[in-house]
Amino acid sequence: MAAGLVLSFNTGLAQFHAATESFISANGLDTLLCDIYLPENPSPAGWGIVFLHGGGFSGGQRDDTVNRTYCTKMAKRGVAVASIDYRLRQVSQGFHCDVDIEAKREAIRWAAEDLGAAIETLKHRFPGGIIACGSSAGAEAVLDAAFNLKLPKLRGVISLAGAIEPRAEWADVPVLAFHGTCDALVPFCTAVHHYCPEDSPGALVLAGGGALAQLHDQVSLLAYDNAGHELASTLLSNPLFIERNIQFIQAIAQGTFEPEHLTIPLYRPCALPQSAPVPCN
């Protein structure tokens, strides 16, 4: 990993250093960037979060403002974070109903494989364990990495408005899921991605946070009643989101994780055609 710009911050909470470094993508052809936020005395010691941004596999980057905010808030609380870029297969193509299912699967897999490449490069920094956190498209990638690629060094996953194709068996990986029950892009329960017509080329069926809590017995779910996909951005600076992230990594490190299902009421209507119990039926 090549060294880059290093900055130091004294925030009044934990003091941390931020450095931009590089790693090679999973295909061995592309150089990708990674921003590392390393507290002087990280807690849990030897542990870190690898964060994947959202953007529909066609946009976004590791150092967008909302992503820097999340990483900075975590580092101020003493948690080490590495925010990575990954190959964006859908640049200029999007991730909509006219994009065929195999292209969508490949876009998710590219990002998941690049997460694996980043973890291999970062593993010496986080010998205690690694948690993968993703927002929207990034969440779909970290779920794919945990349950389809079954990356051995992943000790837990944080999914913010993410989903995965339903499966019969689940790897022994705890999940902390945040999802709005009225998400029109990434379904909270099991439904077609973007609620595309079932006969469209992109009718990819995915299980969101609510479905994960029903299907997998190691899920801690925070369901935001009638919230939409805006949570993929707004929660990244939310104090409850930050606190739950910290509690999750500490519980995984200490071996005390226990699943739970919480609903946060927002008292507003939802226009989607389906109801969304918590967890899903």
Image (spheres, rainbow, N blue to C red):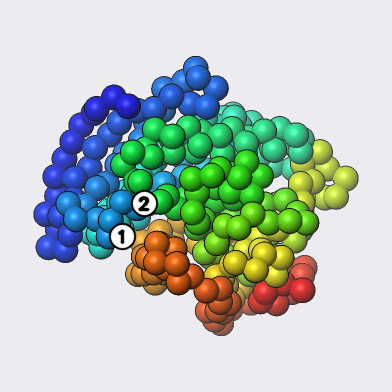
Quadrant of the frame with the C terminus: bottom right
Q: Does residue 268 sit above or below 233 in this rendering?
A: below
Residue 226 sits in which quadrant?
bottom right
Residue at point 58%, 48% (across, down) = 146
Residue at point 64%, 49% (across, down) = 147
Residue 213 sits in which quadrant?
bottom right
Residue at point 38%, 43% (across, down) = 83
Residue 17 sits in which quadrant?
top left
144 and 120: which is toward the camera: 120
**Which x, y percent locates residue 59?**
50, 37
Q: Is residue 195 visible?
A: no
Q: Residues within 10 Å of mark 1 (few under 14, many from 20)?
A: some
**Which x, y percent locates residue 208?**
66, 60
CB contact under 8 Å: marks 2 and 1 = yes
Q: Does residue 113 sit above or below 257 in this rendering?
A: above
Element type where label 1 sits in the image: loop
The residue where tag 2 is placed is 128
The answer to whether residue 253 is left or right of residue 141 is: left
The residue where tag 1 is placed is 44
**Which x, y percent locates residue 242?**
37, 65
